Amino acid sequence: MLLNPASLPAARAAVQDLGASRIREVANAGIGLQDVLPFWFGEPDQETPAFIREAAKQSLDAGDTFYTHNFGIPPLREAIAAYLSALHRPIASSRVAVTSSGVSALMLLAQLIVNPGDRVVAVTPLWPNLVEIPKILGAEVVKVPLQFGQTWELDVQQLLDALTPGTKAVLINSPNNPTGWVITKEQQEIILAHCRKHGIWILADDVYERLVYDGAPGQRACAPSFLDLAAPEDRLVSANSFSKSWLMTGWRLGWVVAPEPLMADLGKLIEYNTSCAPGFVQRAGVTAIERGEEIIAHTLSRYQAARDFLYERLNALPGITTPRPKGAMYLFFRVDGAQDTLALCKRMVVEAKLGLAPGNAFGPEGEGYVRWCFASSIERLDEGVNRLAAFLSR
């Protein structure tokens, strides 16, 4: 019996129209292959430090396996608020909510402020999850691309022109995945003033804020943040995560900062999405914040050395042009003549045993580029460049 396709069960149109992860498509092509060097995901090659893991073990041994408050356990909310207040302006713990991952934080914030049909502007190239989240909610996403050069840069006037009256929100990820672009304080001041004038929300993805390079020796590394400038009543929401700074990608723990009047409604959304983050994971988060500055400093030093090494090696290859990233953990480089970077990266993983992320995974404006996560050892990066050079020479 032949079935009419129109009669088959189907997801709603907004979900069907979502783009599947092309990064995952490349990774799937490498599953089962021997000796593949995987630089495709935004994940460090080092495990979570032992003292953080031990905190979770102790919490489990104490029987911490029950539901917690929707907003998270008080010690973690207070630790996050104190941590952010030391980096930025004072932030009350009543404005902090713990989430089950950074991506969950982004989804919750979008659910909190975005309606179907709303106009949302995004600075791109951008991690595909963040671009697709408003589309899940039925919003229109307008893109403002960064400018390619010696470093990736933002044309602020182009962004302001896109932030027309009636725009609901602007999505800004800085330091940026995939380019490593870092917004300046002066640019933030201009954007914040414009958004205040027109009642536009700023949704800031701050997950890489501690991974910023070339600062003054001895200075506590932190990228410019809208949290440095915004008043508590401003239309600013910030999402963050334990994944990158504390080497905790698999723990799925994040947080949001929102204006006080939104918190009650945010609590409803957390309840209806995940209810709460696991208590023993939150206890590990408390320990990470209280004892983790040494880990962040070590990670930053390691990543800066890896960035500098990979930048020099890649720029020495014919046909490769690599802007120098100011933050995050990626090089987003141009490959001369690349027409379909998804196909290119799938070939590369099979033929060269090298796993990189295709630029078109980050939107059409990323076509012709490839992302390399440098959160790895120099030795692995060196072998990866050797494989890339051999592949390109063929």
Image: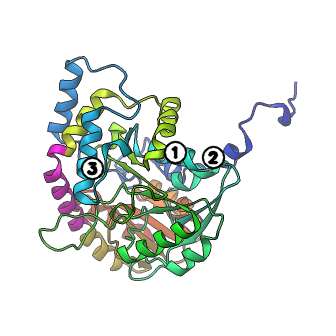
The residue beneath circle 2 is 136
- Percent of width and height locating residue 96: 36, 44
> Any mark on residue 45, and which?
3
Q: What residue range appears in magenta?
A: 290-306
> Any mark on residue 107, and which?
1
Q: Secondary structure at mark 2?
A: helix
Indicate left or right for 188 with 44 as reference. Answer: right
**Which is the main secondary structure of the residues drawn in magenta?**
helix
Q: Residue at x 87, y 33 (%)?
A: 4
Q: Residue at x 34, y 76 (%)?
A: 324
Near mark 1 (Cα within 10 A), the count class, few <14, some 14-19 or many ≥20, is many
Cα gap from disc 1 to disc 3, whole angstroms: 27 Å
| Discs 2, 1 touching: Cβ within 8 Å | yes
| Nearer the observer, 164 or 371 | 164
Kind of residue indicated by mark 3: Asp
Near mark 3 (Cα within 10 A), the count class, few <14, some 14-19 or many ≥20, is few
- Percent of width and height locating residue 182: 37, 70
Kind of residue indicated by mark 1: Met
